[in-house]
Amino acid sequence: MKDHNSNKLYNECKEWIFDEYFSSLGEEISRNIGHMYTPANWGITIITSTIIFVISQDNYPSNILLFALLISLTVSNHFFTLSLKGYINVLRYSTLRKKIIHLHLMTNYKKNDVDKLKEDIDTYEVQWKLPVARKTIILKSCVDLGFGLIQLLAISSIIYTSLQLSFSNFEIVIVGGLIAINIGIYINFMCSPYMKTKQVDELAKKLR
């Protein structure tokens, strides 16, 4: 009786994975592709528009225009991190979808194969782990998504502008605060569950 109930639960779980859960993955991938591209477009538009506006002003360089660059960089970084969250979710759901398709195409998969798939779902869906290394995410965001080039352009503009200006103590506080906010955005993102991997968890356990 116990074996019968166990087999029944196993079959129900398998059907759920291959039917309902598999269908939901396609919807999640489509939704997160939108979450990836929309904030990225906003971030790129804001920072490039601000740079063009700033350097075209007759009073460039000025402290006010430098503040405008820093504020636009802060807003853009917020959108870039939102875009990266969408990108990471696409990777998670695509990885699980690929694993389900691979298992479904196997002609003689066993119960252990389904159990391994359940573990992967728990890892990437429930525990919210990354399916790739952190450095891969950073490299992809800088190169493939173009964030690296845009950030380099923005930071270069900020450095060039600031070197030609003098600041009061109050203005130094404002500039320092905006720089700290930008750094904080990335630190917060790197420490968030979105950037958690199996390796990070294992290292944390060793350090405890």
Image (spheres, grey):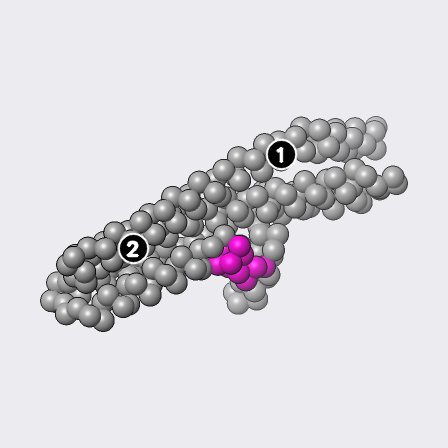
Quarter of the image for residue 13 reads: top right
Callout count: 2
Q: Amino acid at mark 2?
A: Ile
Which residue appears at 31% of the width and 49% of the height?
49
Q: Nearer the viewer, residue 133 or 1?
A: 133
- Give the x, y percent position of residue 156: 33, 65
- Give the x, y percent position of residue 92: 60, 45
Q: Nearer the viewer, residue 202 or 44?
A: 44
For residue 166, above or below residue 181: below
**Label 1 belongs to which residue?**
26
Which residue appears at 17% of the width and 65% of the height?
172
The range drawn in magenta is: 133-144
Which residue appears at 48% of the width and 59% of the height?
142
Element at label 1? helix
For residue 181, above or below residue 116: below
**Label 2 belongs to which residue?**
51
Q: Amino acid at mark 1?
A: Gly
Q: CA distance from mark 1 to mark 2?
A: 38 Å
